[in-house]
Image (spheres, rainbow, N blue to C red):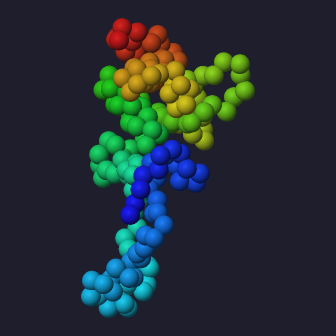
Amino acid sequence: MIAKPTGIEPNLGLNAQYATCGTRVTTARSAAAREGYPASVMESPVPPRPTEPRPRRRDRHGRGMRGPVAPPQVPLATSRSESFRDLVRDSVDRLERRWPQLAEVEFLVMDVPTTQDETVPLGSSVPAAKEHPARILVYRRPVEIRTKNRDERALLVHEVVVEQVAELLGLAPESVDPRYGQE
């Protein structure tokens, strides 16, 4: 006979059920014997392991996959630095149509500037020398910090590239790109 407790019993909790005196507690082994199963079926409390190894899963604790799974051609698979390089490349391609002499200029992307100035530059230009061609550097982290989304980042990257090209050519940014400052 199983009785419900009237109050909170120590070590049982509020909704616990307990067996009264004279009640026989059955185990899985005795229930299996009564049902006609051989005793050897229920002797091992742990089921045997499968012979083949289990597939490793990345879905632990029900949290889903650890990151987006996408092929390399899909934009989800590109890193922030690759995406930034693409923005610089798009801006340079846009300017090279108007200024063919930019084909001889190297455009480089660096994470952070190496200068110790108080102000952090977004880009810099280095004139041509005997040992290297003219270079324009765009600094990725300062640009990313100043923008909130990809569209703002694309506009700022284009402005930085236009300003550095103008400085390298000795022109005003508006003459390098007539839409400079309007977007």
Q: Image point 69% across, 28% down: which residue? A: 115
Q: Is residue 119 above or below residue 86?
A: above
Asked whether residue 32 appears in the rendered view, the answer is yes
Q: Image point 27% across, 88% down: which residue? A: 36
Q: Quadrant of the N terminus?
A: bottom left
**Of the pair 39 and 5, the residue shown nearer to us:** 5
Query: Which x, y percent locates residue 104?
Result: 44, 35
- State the image quarter where residue 119 is shown: top right
- State the image quarter where residue 112 is shown: top right
Query: Which x, y percent locates residue 170?
Result: 51, 15
**Of the pair 104 and 159, the residue shown nearer to us:** 159
Asked whether residue 101 appears in the rendered view, the answer is no
Q: Image point 63% across, 22% down: which residue? A: 120
Query: Which x, y percent locates residue 147?
Result: 47, 22
Q: Is residue 156 above or below residue 135?
A: above
Which residue is the extreme one toward the left? 36
Which residue is the extreme one toward the front? 22
Q: Is residue 3 above or below residue 155?
A: below
